[in-house]
Image: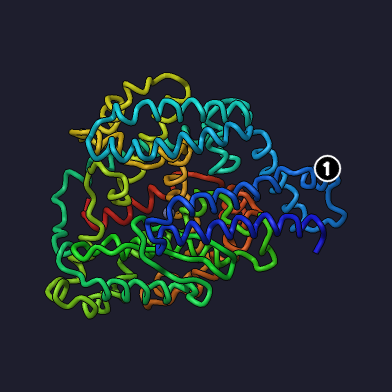
Amino acid sequence: MSDFRSHLAQICDLNHAAAVLEWDQETYMPSAAAEARAHQIATLRRLAHELLVSEKTATHLEKGSDESSSDDDALYRVTQRDFDRAIRIPADLVEELAETAALARQAWRTARESDTFSTFAPHLEKIVELNLRKAEAVGYDEHPYDALLDEFEPGMKTAEVANVFAELRDQLVPIVQALTAEVKPDDRMLHRHFPHDAQWDFGVGVITDFGYDFNRGRQDLSTHPFTTTFSISDVRLTTRVDEAFFNPAFFGTLHEAGHGMYEQGVDGALERTPLADGTSLGMHESQSRLWENLVGRSRGFWSHYYPKVQNAFPDALGDVSEENFYRAINRVENSLIRVEADEVTYNLHVMVRFELETEMIEGKIGIADLPEAWNDRIEAFLGIRPSNDAEGVLQDIHWSLGAIGYFPTYALGNLMSTQLFDQANSDIPDLSSQISSGSFEALLEWLRTHVHRHGRKKSANEILTDATGTGLSVESWIHYIRRKYEDLYGL
Ligand code: ZN
């Protein structure tokens, strides 16, 4: 291994060791360990950061590679990018952001519980200000939000997101209006009693069929489901189980497995390099959404799995027809909480957040006016209005963590998911009948080939363009929604 590669490998090791501690913190750690654990994680992350911004990295990057392979080119390019971002943001700003976020997270919890935005407002004000300083430090050509977005969706520009979202909104709002005017499917059966262990086993069975590899991963319980990677051969999922509702555990498990299979599918040659990771949050979300929605909420999927789910939950689903179950899991309605939104209205929730974030960064909206602006925007997009801030501006954790620029990746991922899935369907002509018979090897293989194995070697845009022939667009997703819901609602 070259000196440069072994230097980068040490950085990866430190970050992955920190990730193990973070995973443990969310799953098994006793609560009294919180303070000691915070120190341990901070130490490992700091050492990794110091190695990244070290003289050694700078010297290697300046000298460049002696071999010219595509892996090596990508390795230098991606390391340069990480190095530039890390070195441009001053250490005291990083520290101030971390400290502000720690306090903001507590204030956000209190504010949400007591429905008092004013408790959180000064913290959010500071977070916006620090993010602006971060954007100035990182640098940008057109819009300070570009510098923030770039952390999560490398290469994507604010103006492009704004254009894509404007087009999406124009096409989606009439569809949502038409769908929500219809009589909603009855979904009460999803709220019957679903025993914990049966939910766990059913979910594990399905993601094993998908191809999530339990020899190179595991699943545990946590309050907020997530996927984390310690190496290509150790990618872990978490889920949560609600015995009074079928959806969170099942669809959450499929979602996280989609993230997990992406990370498990990265080319082994990229192990212990910064290339062994998802290329962007949008691309990551395209993988989770593809398995959760395009596969897991499809008619074909349930034609195979419905007898099995009835078997697993005879008391809850024994008297429910496959058609009624399918309609219930695809119920569309205007709702206030993003994480509970259906696949049709979900993107509208994201667009509201994107607009408000860019306006906060531009200084067009003052923090004190944010709750009102939020409610107005939700009403304009969804036709309903939050009655308090807990179901409005205070519902998401992201801002309290200091993250601005993250939200758009959720909707970008939805758009990418159908673009990729359309292409997979055209490359594998009998894919839909394979899915209807519970066979997913060809689909996973296609995703491995076109998306997973590249890790960060290709940008999200390169992956999309190379796989499908076009960059990001809204047509494919809109077409999918029209086709599926015209069939469901007979519009
Ligand atoms: Zn996700």
State the image coordinates of residue 295 (x, y, percent, origin top left): 38, 65
Q: Give the residue at x 22% y 54%.
A: 331
Amino acid under disc 1: Glu
Where residue 4 appears, as percent x and y from the top left, is 79, 55
User: Colour scheme of this structure image?
Assistant: rainbow
Residue 159 visible in the snapshot: no
- The residue singled out by tag 1 in the image is 62
> From where the camera sits, is residue 361 visible?
yes
Q: Residue 365 location, x and y as percent?
A: 38, 21
370 up-or-down from 333: above or below: above
Q: Residue at x 28, y 33 (%)?
A: 378
Instruction: Classify residue 431 as left or right of residue 87.
Output: left
- Left or right of residue 76, residue 301 in this image: left
When asked about the image quadrant of residue 393, the answer is top left
Q: Nearer the viewer, residue 155 or 226?
A: 226
Give the number of callouts: 1
